[in-house]
Image (cartoon, rainbow, N blue to C red):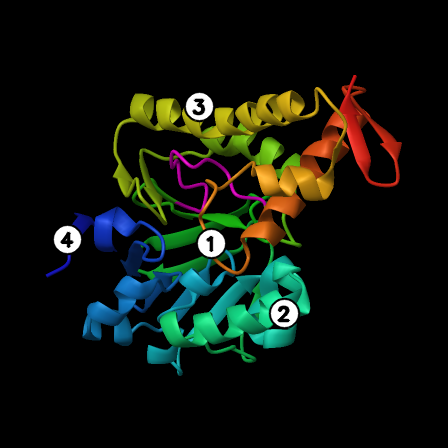
């Protein structure tokens, strides 16, 4: 049986290893009139009627591991921030969302259909920053747009319980992920600067950390998570003590350990490195020597 955290109108069904990828943590919110699910990770497939009878799914963002239970709730209304909406509605939209080369996308489609029960939801509808859902009996959810991981990434707050679902601001030791075509390093930095200002006393992550109920612990986890960005910047500057091409930097790896082999790794590495290089060039800490070589200043 899955481990379940309960807080008033909220249940958090913890996935394997506290929702470590490829699994995740399933939040269910029950009001007098309706029940909502936040995202639908793999653990949703092991919950049963409590999940399968939800009226509404609010996606905090779109990625394959957050859509893995949607096939079980074909009649539930699906709401997605407008910036991620196309990725939920069709495979074509998801391809643009990932931003990977065609061969990688073909491999990803096979993997996510097999391992994550991936099905597009053309019926999904868009919401905006500040959108609210009243579930009845004083139970209310509000979306706070917190982009970076994806363009439409949101923190979902159950206001009556003071519980914030952080999604993939997941406080892991890996650090922030911004390796897709829809990702933004600048937006993620801004998000990390303000996410602690959201009024909450309980924080739930999609992955790994699970449930945090102490603000001091939350802030410490958040600081370590955010620090990973500057750690990567420092490592990249070290690589660039001598001129390097992007391809050479990709092979040295900034995100993943050497030998870690999944189809999207090199694409994610390239996107991440390009975003850091843009930032460093703008700051005058790196210069472009020629078409594809860079060096630290």
In front: label 4 or label 2: 2
In front: label 4 or label 1: 1
Determine which of the numbered discs, if any, sits on residue 3 in the image.
4
Is disc 4 placed on a helix, strand or loop? Answer: loop
The answer to whether 176 is drawn above or below residue 217 in the figure is below
Residue range highlighted in magenta: 166-178
Quadrant including the N terminus: bottom left
Instruction: Report crowding for label 4: few under 14, some 14 to 19, many 20 or more residues within 10 A (C-alpha).
Output: few
Which sits in the foreground, 246 or 17? 246
- Residue under label 2: 103
Q: Residue at x 70, y 19 (%)?
A: 241
Question: Which of marks 1 and 4 precedes in the sequence?
Answer: 4
Q: With 88 as the anchor, is 292 left or right in this view?
A: right
Instruction: Report crowding for label 1: few under 14, some 14 to 19, many 20 or more residues within 10 A (C-alpha).
Output: few
Quadrant including the C terminus: top right
Does 167 lie within the magenta span?
yes
Question: Which of marks 4 and 3 precedes in the sequence?
Answer: 4
- Residue under label 1: 261
Q: Disc 4 to disc 2, how far (Cα)?
A: 39 Å
């Amino acid at each position: 049986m899955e481990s379940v955290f309960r807080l008033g109108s909220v249940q958090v069904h913890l996935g394997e290893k506290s929702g470590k990828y490829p699994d995740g943590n399933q939040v269910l919110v029950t009001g007098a009139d309706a029940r909502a699910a936040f995202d639908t990770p793999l653990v949703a497939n092991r919950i049963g009627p409590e999940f399968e009878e939800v009226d509404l799914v609010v996606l905090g963002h779109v990625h394959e591991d957050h859509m893995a239970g949607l096939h079980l709730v074909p009649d539930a209304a699906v709401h997605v921030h407008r910036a991620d909406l196309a990725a939920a509605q069709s495979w074509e939209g998801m391809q643009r969302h990932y931003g990977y080369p065609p061969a990688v996308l073909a491999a990803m489609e096979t993997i996510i259909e097999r391992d994550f029960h991936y099905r597009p939801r053309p019926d999904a509808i868009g919401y905006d920053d500040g959108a609210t859902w009243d579930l009845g009996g004083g139970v209310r959810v509000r979306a706070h747009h917190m982009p970076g991981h994806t363009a439409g990434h949101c923190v979902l707050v159950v206001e009556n319980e003071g519980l914030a679902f952080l999604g993939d601001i997941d406080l892991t030791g890996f650090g922030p992920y911004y390796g897709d075509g829809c990702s933004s390093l600048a937006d993620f930095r801004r998000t990390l600067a303000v996410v602690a200002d959201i009024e909450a006393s309980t924080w739930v992550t999609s992955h790994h950390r699970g449930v945090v109920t102490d603000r001091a612990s939350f802030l410490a986890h958040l600081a370590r998570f955010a620090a990973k960005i500057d750690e990567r910047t420092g490592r990249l500057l070290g690589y660039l003590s001598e001129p390097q091409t992007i391809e050479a930097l990709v092979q040295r790896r900034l995100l993943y350990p050497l030998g870690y082999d999944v189809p999207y790794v090199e694409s994610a590495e390239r996107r991440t490195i390009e975003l850091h290089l843009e930032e460093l060039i703008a700051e005058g800490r790196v210069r472009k020597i020629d078409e594809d070589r860079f060096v630290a200043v």
